[in-house]
Structure formats: C-alpha cells, structure tokens
C-alpha cells in the first residue's frame, strides 16, 4: 500500500464514528481492520472474480460472510471494489453495492 493510501469504509462499525467514511495511511487502515475484525465472531472475506484489471485499475467482486460478535447475526454480502494502483501500490480502494456503479467510478463503460 502507498503510505498515503485512501481506504473507504465498507461497513459501519461501533468503534468508528459515523462521520468517518474514509481513512488515510497505513496506521489508520490497520486500526480500521482491527475494529472490523473485532466486530465479528467469524468472518470470511474472499475475491470471487476480478472483472477488470488494466491501466492501474482493478474491479473485483468480493464476498463477505460472517457472524456478528455481539449480535450473532449472520451476514452474507457481495460488494464490488474499485482498487487504484500507482507504481504497483494500492493508493485508493472504494466499495460499491453494484457492478454498474463500480464501473462508472472506475471510468469504465457501464
């Protein structure tokens, strides 16, 4: 990751203030992932398919499956991520609920 990576928050978490939608830098991403992991009793995150990989832009379909640590609620959610790279390092990652939205954000035809 680029030292100034821009990571857009995917899930609302109790330890993350509601007005925080983006974090910047390695340490902030580490803290975000620690809070994310603590919110789940079990969690699996996987890339189901890379839909676009060119020009330093990747669009991927990812699936999150887990059980809430406090609630016990099961979650099974598919999201589309746009990852932007520069010189082989991640500089920005953004989640979207549908592919068309992700493709528009990546400046790809719908």
Image (tube, rainbow, N blue to C red):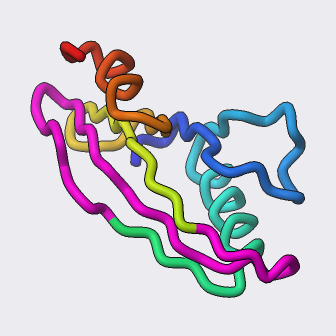
Q: Residue at x 15, y 37 (%)?
A: 52
Q: How many marks?
A: 0
The x and y percentages for residue 91 are 40, 35
In the image shown, does 106 or 84 lie closer to the viewer? 106
Q: Is residue 65 magenta?
A: yes
Q: Residue at x 44, y 54 (%)?
A: 78
Using residue 51 as the reference point, say whether residue 5 is left or right of it. Answer: right
Our reading of the magenta stretch's main secondary structure is strand
Q: Residue furthest bottom?
A: 41
Q: Residue at x 71, y 86 (%)?
A: 41
The x and y percentages for residue 14 are 88, 58
The x and y percentages for residue 1 are 40, 48
Using residue 4 as the reference point, say whether residue 75 is left or right of it. Answer: right
Q: Is residue 63 magenta?
A: yes
Q: Residue at x 61, y 53 (%)?
A: 29
- Bounds of the magenta segment: 47-75
Q: Quadrant of residue 105?
A: top left
The x and y percentages for residue 99 are 33, 33
Q: Quadrant of residue 20?
A: top right
Using residue 92 as the reference point, say whether residue 39 is left or right of it. Answer: right
Q: Quadrant of residue 89?
A: top left
Using residue 103 as the reference point, say whether residue 108 is left or right of it. Answer: left
Question: Measured along the vertical axis of the image, is residue 86 above or below residue 72?
Answer: above
Considering the image in quadrants, where does the C terminus appear?
top left
């Amino acid at each position: 990751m680029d030292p100034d990576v821009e990571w857009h928050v995917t899930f609302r978490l109790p330890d993350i203030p509601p007005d925080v939608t983006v974090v910047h830098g390695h340490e902030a991403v580490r803290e975000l992932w620690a809070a994310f992991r603590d919110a789940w009793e079990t969690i699996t995150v996987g890339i189901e398919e890379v839909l676009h990989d060119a020009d330093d832009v990747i669009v991927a379909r990812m699936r999150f499956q887990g059980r809430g640590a406090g609630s016990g609620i099961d979650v099974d959610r598919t999201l589309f991520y746009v990852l932007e790279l520069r010189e082989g390092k991640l500089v920005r990652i953004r989640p979207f609920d549908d592919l068309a939205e992700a493709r528009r954000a990546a400046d790809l035809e719908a």
